[in-house]
Amino acid sequence: MNNIDLDSLIYLTILGAAVIGWFIAENRQGLGKIARMLVAWGLIFVGFVGAYGLWEDIEGELVPRQAVIADGSAISIPRSFDGHFHLTLQINDVPVDFLVDTGATDIVLTLKDAARIGLDPDELAFIGRARTANGDVRTAFATLDTVELGPFSHRNIPASVNEGEMPGSLLGMRYLSLFDRIEISGDQMTLEP
């Protein structure tokens, strides 16, 4: 620590002590009440920090992402708190989270998800182009060996890998059209074979 930092630290310590001293002198009679309020606000702050830290663990309990209808003949997907439908599919035996996008043609994987399922991004040929809300991006063609959703399994499904930045992978109509019936009713999407 050099002299300038030490001088600043001493100055700020003296200034802080003066402010705290003035605050105590001005509020002598209400110090108990102020201490209780500080403790209450501190506990509220700790509660918010704890809830934020545990959100990923409790989100699945509070907001279910998908459910298989009892007889196994359909997949029912509740609308998520963000207003979208989300699904987790097993791609090559690896769980991958998707945003259901009926405006997308393909299954579009992020580079990270592509690597997780065994596709080496360095070996992909990014020769395709896709027009997105963020502009043109390069894409690579890939074939997914197995795609499983609950009791439904499909093989050799074409997909695209997006070279650009994406918040998550997209599940487009190429996969959704493998189901005979797609219905959105209220806050529920149903896929039936």
Image: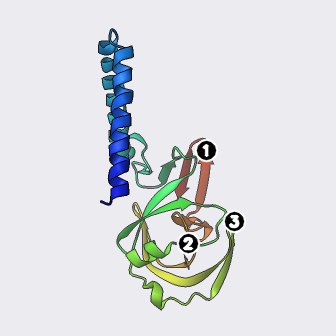
Q: Report x, y in % for residue 108.
A: 55, 72
For marks 1 and 2, give the CA distance.
25 Å
- Is there a contact, CB below 8 Å, between mark 3 and mark 2? no
Q: Which mark is residue 121?
A: none
Q: Is residue 63 visible?
A: yes
For disc 3, the marked residue is 133
- Is there a contact, CB below 8 Å, between mark 3 and mark 1? no
Residue that appears at 43% across and 49% down: 69
Give the amino acid type for the residue marked by disc 2 in the picture. Val
For disc 1, the marked residue is 185
Q: Nearer the viewer, mark 3 or mark 2?
A: 3
Q: Report x, y in % for residue 120.
A: 42, 85
Q: Report x, y in % for residue 138.
A: 62, 81
Give the amino acid type for the residue marked by disc 3 in the picture. Ala
For marks 3 and 1, give the CA distance.
27 Å
For disc 2, the marked residue is 108
Q: Is residue 144 left or right of residue 39?
A: right
Q: Nearer the viewer, mark 1 or mark 2?
A: 2
Q: Residues within 10 Å of mark 1 (few under 14, many from 20)?
A: few
Q: Quadrant of residue 20?
A: top left
